[in-house]
Amino acid sequence: MLLGFGFQAFVSRVCGADALGAITLFLSWVGILSVLTVPGLEGSLVYFLPRLEGDAPASRRVMRQCLAVAGTASMVVASAVALAGPRLFSWTGLPDKARAAFCIALIAYSGGKLLDAVFLGLKDAPAQIYFNNIRTIARFLFCLPVLLYPSERWIILFCAVASECVLTVLWRYMQLRRRYPTLTGMVRIPRAAGAASHKVLAAMALPMLGISIIDTVYPLLDKAVLGVMVPLALVGIYRIGDAVASINSMFVSPFIAFWPYISQLHGQQRLDDLRDSYRTITLFIIAGMIPFSLLLVELSPMVLSIFGPAFASQGRTIFLVLAFGTAIDAIAGPAGAVLKLTGHARLSLTINMVWLFLYFGLTVLLVRRYGILGAAIAKMISTVFGNLANLTANRVLLGVFPYTAKHAWMLMAAAIILSTRWSLFPAHPGVVGQFVAGFVEAAVFIAFSALLLKDQIRRVLVPQIRLWMQKGFALDAAN
């Protein structure tokens, strides 16, 4: 995440807010079209691979089927974009000079997206963090020529993104072959008894396609709409506010590793274990996210100023609105994943489609009236709606509700701390005052959470810390 901020700061400072807006729009449209090139296959892999654990031939067959479909679809969609005229491509808000790089990036991005799902389905979620870091470093290195040829910045930036996509998809495949050699290779394999047939895979992929629409399009739709309706410089400013607000998601990302276990626990009819694990996850998300959010709200003027004066002056309100939405999304935890991985993919599809149409309608309506602030408000409202719908469905259908009285006490404590700070000290302090206020607020909440969660800390964290210490001592002894 810090690497991503560094890259965005580099582009905004060296090339300007409009260049950052252009890259944001480029990646947004690549991501949106990947819904067509990877039609529900990533969710299908996360569903099937944990259930086929230990059955290498069946897992390999499912993976090959998905890769074949994604490869064909990406070539078809990229060819359609390449053959489209400049006028049609201009509807994206991008210049026509980006079209060739866009087609290459689309094909490579689609392959990388599917391989990420393979790693996640194999319960190797840390691989995604590793590949994201490689991707950001490669993107930064490929953009360095802009320092020598500033007049060609558009071509350099677009080609840098396409080159990074190609490099990282090849790197993912090489790592897959190294870590899981039984799943790769060109040897023809017979039909496995436990493998999913084409019909079964299609039956799962179709509802997963609708689900993936919201998972993929939701983070990108606001930037795509803004690219059509406002100047690219405002898209760049909005992107930074969104990126800073999305820092809260780092407290959710580690728990993506729990997704394969959702399918596994449901398949074993262990709903009580699923509910207890879900509650523990949301407890630790709140305990980690809230103090960091309190600190981030205080420091946001300084953080936004890193990208330039325009980002600090116009981006803070955007950040505050989006930060509330990301906090709600984090507190909900894997609500959507629980629903779609427990046999309710069609209901999840319905919720996601309503969610998407609501989001699109609100975005267009509010952007016309309020500009980039309207996009932030639309995203916040739709986030609250979607998570409430998923939580309600999980409670009614599965009896899984991820909250207890402890969750309520922690959220109340955060609200009291924040309201007390702004009622006693309404004036915005300088940089030193921001640090002091943020750290005091975070320290008070951490102390309260430690007292409230002492049983969970003793049961979950202490054994893990002891295990790490034992491994460390054993390593020292071996050396």
Image: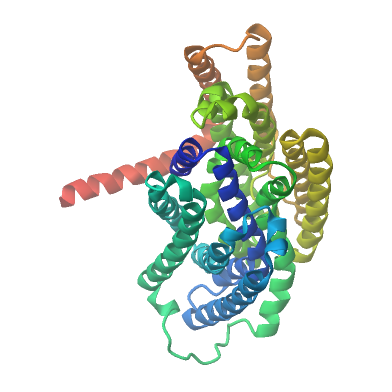
Residue drawn at x 79%, y 48% is 359
Frontmost residue, 168 versus 224: 224
Residue sitting farthest toward the left: 479
The residue lying toward the viewer, choosing from 323 and 343, is 323
Q: Is residue 136 above or below residue 242?
A: below
Residue 276 seen by the camera:
yes
Colouring: rainbow
In the image, residue 209 above or below residue 95 = below
Q: Is residue 134 left or right of residue 430?
A: left
Residue 148 horizontal/vertical position (percent): 37, 46
> Toward the viewer: 283 or 272?
283
Give the quarter of the image for residue 340. Answer: bottom right
Identify the image quadrant of residue 236.
top right
Q: Residue shown at 35%/71% (left/top)?
A: 178
The residue at the point 75 percent across, 45 percent down is 229
Q: Is residue 353 left or right of residue 212?
A: right
Position of residue 316 measured from the top left corner of the image (x, y, whole percent): 63, 27
Q: Is residue 295 visible?
A: no
